Amino acid sequence: MAEIIPTLRQRLGGRSLYLVGMMGSGKSSTGRPLAEKLGYGFVDSDSVIAQLAGCSIPEIFQRDGEAGFRKLETQVLSAISEHHSLVVATGGGVVTRSENWGVMHQGIVIWLDVEREQLLKRLEADSTPRPLLQEADPAQALDRILNARRPQYGEADLTVVIEEETPDVVADGILQLLPNLIKDPPKQRPE
């Protein structure tokens, strides 16, 4: 694996990698080892949003609603995109605004697609408050969100289906798949 990294980094040419997927899909936990192995920086967009707002994501949802949060998310994503050579763990709903796709497609968008039952198990084991699941039946809310977003996630450049793999294994899988995705510029013919 280590031997392909310098060539891969060169072929990426500084393009950032944007990890998208449902809450609990492992964007942050996969993004950290992926960035480290690639020699890239790592940014968790939700952490940046919370830091900028001076409060937690659930507090932003409570104060400004989902629309207010999405607006702030788009501003933060735009600011992050000014930098290069990053692995960016995005929020699960970043795909719901078309302007975010324009930003993310400047880099490479990778969908971490976790099977529904596995996703439910992860979310039940995670103490992170999830504003969109604060309903009488969180599983039903998850299904509704997943069904609405699945076509949007499908716009990603690369889909990685995750079952029970560790974040390190997922990161290695992404590194193996990326070279096939990157289109090199056409070689100049000598005159």
Image (cartoon, rainbow, N blue to C red):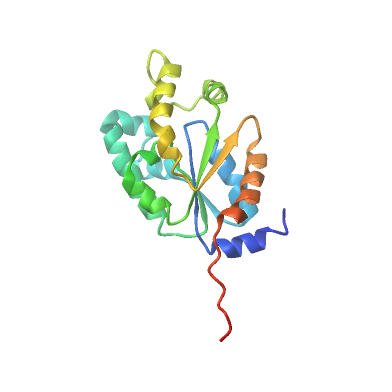
Left or right of 176, for residue 108: left
Q: Left or right of 98: which side holds 88?
A: right
In the displayed structure, 130 sits above or below 21; it is above
* Front residue (pair 137, 189): 189
Residue at 62 percent across and 30 percent down: it is 163
Give the image quarter of residue 91. Answer: top left
Q: Residue 104: x percent and y percent?
A: 42, 51
Q: Percent x, y for residue 77?
A: 38, 49
Could you say where residue 108 lies in the image, as x and y percent from the top left?
A: 49, 52
In front here: 37 or 144?
144
Q: Residue at x 58, y 41 (%)?
A: 30
Could you tell me which residue is drawn at 32 percent across and 34 percent down?
A: 60
Dividing the image into 4 quarters, which one contains the C terminus?
bottom right
For the image shown, how many numbered marks are present on the structure? 0
Q: Nearer the viewer, residue 84 or 58?
A: 84
Q: Is residue 130 above or below residue 173?
A: above
Name of the residue lying farthest toward the top: 136
| Image position of 14 (left or right of 164) | left
- Residue at horizontal 37%, vertical 54%? 79
Direction from residue 138 to residue 8 in the image, left or right: right
Give the quadrant of residue 57.
top left
As displayed, is residue 68 above or below residue 101? above
Location of residue 179 in the rendering, given as x and y in whole percent from the top left corner: 61, 56
Seen from this angle, which residue lies furthest bottom?
191
- Residue 94 found in image quarter: top left
